[in-house]
């Protein structure tokens, strides 16, 4: 029998199959990919320093295949089975996001690879939200939704067998892996037939549009698939000419010389024809679920850097006037607030605001090969200054709750946002998931620490 296929390879095949399926379902996604590929190529040509940085960090290879998607599920059983499904592809739950604070009745995690090697191979991520039915005010409607969800099965019988096989055998062989990709894809496919009648859809939609999206369909259709751009401002500016109407504001930090965390923008959900269970052939209703999104990723921030980011973002979101009493736009406030966030790599590093990977530079390698040890006086800072060691920014691989809420909302139409009492329920989420989520800060800190240990072992020979 053929050997067991690596989880990285299964993930790469799955991510490609998902991208092909989504391109067929949503042709605008294909146009978006072309636009982003074109902008990335031009950006790399125009900015040799960025090109060199990405090459050194070995990120150039992954750029063209890098995607994240998003799905929303309705029950604990669905969520925990998804955890097992993603594990077959080496994707583990990282982070907890409470979106109820932003008027969206879900909480979420991101399934993604966690080791550096796996991230380098293919960083495919899926932002996965669990509907919080307990936040539906009407108890009868809550029960109805629960019953509908309880009656569906979002996985094919064969994929369930293959998940169990991967768990017991420690992986899948080539042919099994191909079958797994094909069967797993079924869970994420769009279904234009609703499982409920039009009146049920309407009452769930009335409670919250998102509830209808999760409850009324056969499965958790992938609702967007996001490529990574190196210049989100250029991409945003180019979108209208390609017939995509981007949301007004880019979520996340403002444009900077040294990108931090994550900036995202999306274009509106498509309105799609849907046939409800009580409709005959030819009759149709509609539903909006699927949209397009692009993102630009920057350096991961330390807890101190993240606290500063959260504080400045909150400040930017407060209405403010200039000295003449004129209201400042959100963009102006964002720009003003982030003047307080250092914008050069050295300051970010020395003030411990961001995570870096320390590696020997070519000059450092040469010096070691010549068997001359580094002078230990001065240590790391001096080696960096002498060009023997380089500090590479570690890319942020996760999401941002305020941004995610903004993306959700821009696609929920202009309806007034419902308010839910803020209550993160991480423990309940982890109980439903059947596992605890990784702490993303611990992952970045470990990557930085490991690079340091490796460096010291080489230097001290
Ligand atoms: C997920 C929205 C959040 C992101 O990139 O922050 C998201 C959803 O709409 O299901 O995708
Ligand atoms: Ni997204």
Image: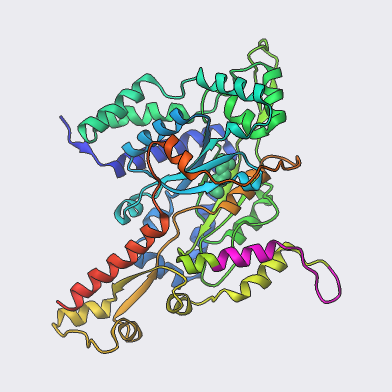
Does 326 sit above or below residue 81? below
Which residues fall within the magenta stretch? Answer: 308-326
Does 124 sit above or below residue 254? above
Quick one: quadrant of the N terminus? top left
Q: Position of residue 260 (x, y in %)?
A: 51, 65
Is any part of residue 407 visible from this angle?
no
Quick one: quadrant of the C terminus? bottom left
The residue drawn where x is 59% and y is 59% is 252
Does 76 sit above or below residue 104? above
Identify which residue, 449 or 392, lies in the foreground: 449
Q: Quadrant of residue 209?
A: top right
Q: Position of residue 83 (x, y in %)?
A: 39, 36
**Which coloring applies here?**
rainbow
The residue drawn where x is 58% and y is 63% is 310
In terms of image quarters, where does ligand 1 lie? top right
Is any part of residue 430 visible from this angle?
yes
């Amino acid at each position: 029998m053929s050997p067991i296929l690596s989880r990285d390879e299964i993930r790469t095949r799955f991510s490609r199959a998902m991208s092909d399926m989504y391109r067929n379902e949503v042709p605008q996604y294909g146009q978006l990919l072309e636009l982003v590929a074109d902008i990335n190529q031009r950006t790399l040509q125009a900015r040799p320093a960025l090109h060199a940085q990405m090459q050194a960090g070995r990120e150039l290879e992954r750029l063209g295949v890098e995607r994240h998607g998003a799905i929303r599920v309705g029950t604990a059983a669905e969520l925990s089975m998804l955890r097992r499904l993603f594990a077959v592809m080496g994707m583990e739950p990282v982070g907890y996001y409470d979106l109820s604070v932003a008027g969206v009745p879900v909480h979420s995690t991101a399934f993604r690879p966690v080791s550096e090697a796996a991230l380098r191979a293919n960083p495919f991520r899926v932002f996965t939200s669990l509907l919080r039915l307990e936040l539906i005010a009407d108890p009868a409607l809550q029960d109805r939704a629960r019953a509908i969800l309880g009656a569906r099965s979002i996985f094919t019988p064969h994929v369930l067998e293959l998940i169990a096989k991967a768990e017991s055998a420690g992986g899948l062989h080539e042919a099994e892996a191909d079958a797994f990709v094909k069967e797993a894809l079924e869970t994420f496919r769009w279904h234009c037939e609703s499982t409920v009648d039009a009146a049920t859809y309407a009452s769930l939609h009335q409670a919250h549009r998102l509830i209808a999206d999760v409850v009324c369909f056969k499965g958790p259709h992938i609702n967007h698939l996001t490529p990574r751009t190196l210049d989100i401002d250029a991409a945003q500016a180019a979108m209208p000419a390609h017939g995509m109407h981007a949301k007004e504001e880019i979520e996340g930090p403002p444009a900077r010389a040294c990108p931090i965390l994550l900036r995202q923008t999306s274009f509106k959900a498509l309105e799609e024809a849907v046939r409800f269970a009580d409709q005959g052939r030819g009759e149709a209703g509609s539903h909006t679920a699927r949209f397009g999104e692009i993102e630009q990723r920057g350096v991961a921030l330390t807890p101190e850097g993240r606290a500063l980011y959260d504080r400045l973002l909150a400040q930017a979101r407060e209405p403010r006037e200039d000295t003449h009493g004129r209201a400042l736009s959100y963009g102006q406030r964002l720009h003003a607030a982030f003047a307080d966030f250092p914008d050069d790599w050295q300051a970010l590093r020395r003030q411990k605001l961001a995570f870096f990977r320390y590696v020997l530079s070519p000059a450092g390698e040469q010096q070691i090969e010549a068997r001359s040890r580094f002078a230990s006086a001065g240590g790391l800072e001096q080696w960096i200054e002498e060009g023997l060691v380089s500090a590479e920014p570690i890319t942020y691989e996760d999401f941002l709750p305020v941004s995610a809420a903004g993306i959700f909302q821009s696609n929920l139409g202009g309806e007034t946002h419902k308010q839910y009492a803020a209550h993160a329920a991480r423990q309940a989420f982890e109980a439903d998931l059947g596992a605890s989520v990784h702490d993303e800060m611990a992952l970045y800190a470990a990557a930085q620490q490991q690079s340091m240990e490796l460096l010291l072992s080489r230097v001290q020979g």
